[in-house]
């Protein structure tokens, strides 16, 4: 349930931010964020027009992967907290010491899997990102539709 609530909040933010930055089809950015946030948000941050005094370095591929790594970390952190909360109720309702021990062992295995999955995906993404990073590309705001707005 927490995932969908988070997606609604972030999708609304993306919609209003895209609209304020004069992007094409802000509604589609918001809908895409709602359904597949972890994939759409990195592309949004890499492609959105920059406002005054904003800077983006490294090229589109690097910025997509960097944003993915940040949101992947946040999502897996949320999954870990959610898993710990769910396990807490199982341990609380356990009727014997053996059940509590089993729940604790299961929690440790589950958290280990979440941390392992987070680490493998994060390292893989960052290694690919470092190969694709172009340090010579530096964008300074305003860009895109915001640049046209400021010019006479």
Image (cartoon, rainbow, N blue to C red):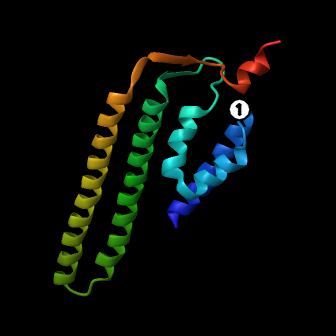
Position of residue 15 measured from the top left corner of the image (x, y, whole percent): 69, 45
Crowd tier of the residue under label 1, counting other residues whose Cα lies within 10 Å: few below 14, some 14–19, many 20 or above? some
Query: Depth check: 77 or 57 in front?
Result: 57
Q: Quadrant of residue 114?
A: bottom left
Q: Quadrant of residue 54?
A: top right
Residue located 71% across and 42% down the image: 16
- Secondary structure found at label 1: loop
**Could you tell whether 83 is left or right of 58 in the image?**
left
Q: Is residue 49 above or below residue 97?
A: above
Query: Depth check: 132 or 37 in front?
Result: 132
Residue located 41% across and 21% down the image: 134
Residue located 17% across and 76% down the image: 101
Q: Is residue 102 visible to us here?
A: yes
Query: Depth check: 21 or 43 in front?
Result: 43
**Could you tell whether 84 is left or right of 102 in the image?**
right
Position of residue 49 measured from the top left corner of the image (x, y, whole percent): 64, 28
> Count of labels shown?
1
Can you identify the residue that label 1 sits on?
Answer: 21
Looking at the rendering, in which quadrant would you find the C terminus? top right
**Could you tell whether 58 is left or right of 10 in the image?**
left
In this view, the residue farthest toward the front is 132
Position of residue 113 measured from the top left corner of the image (x, y, whole percent): 25, 60
Position of residue 57 measured from the top left corner of the image (x, y, whole percent): 47, 21
In this view, the residue farthest toward the right is 152
In this view, the residue farthest toward the top is 152
Q: Is residue 142 above or below residue 63?
A: above
Residue located 32% across and 82% down the image: 93
Q: Is residue 9 visible to us here?
A: no
């Amino acid at each position: 349930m927490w995932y969908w609530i988070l997606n609604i909040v972030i999708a609304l933010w993306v919609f209003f931010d895209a609209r304020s930055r004069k992007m094409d089809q802000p509604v589609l950015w918001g809908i895409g964020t709602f359904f597949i946030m972890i994939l759409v948000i990195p592309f949004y941050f890499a492609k959105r027009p920059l406002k005054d005094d904003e800077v983006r370095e490294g090229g589109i591929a690097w910025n997509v992967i960097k944003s993915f790594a940040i949101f992947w970390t946040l999502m897996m952190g949320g999954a870990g907290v959610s898993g710990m909360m769910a396990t807490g109720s199982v341990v609380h309702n356990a009727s014997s010491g053996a059940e509590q021990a089993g729940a604790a062992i299961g929690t440790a295995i589950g958290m280990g899997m979440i941390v392992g999955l987070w680490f493998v995906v994060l390292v893989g993404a960052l290694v690919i990102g470092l190969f694709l990073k172009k340090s010579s590309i530096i964008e300074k705001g305003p860009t895109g539709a915001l640049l046209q707005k400021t010019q006479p």
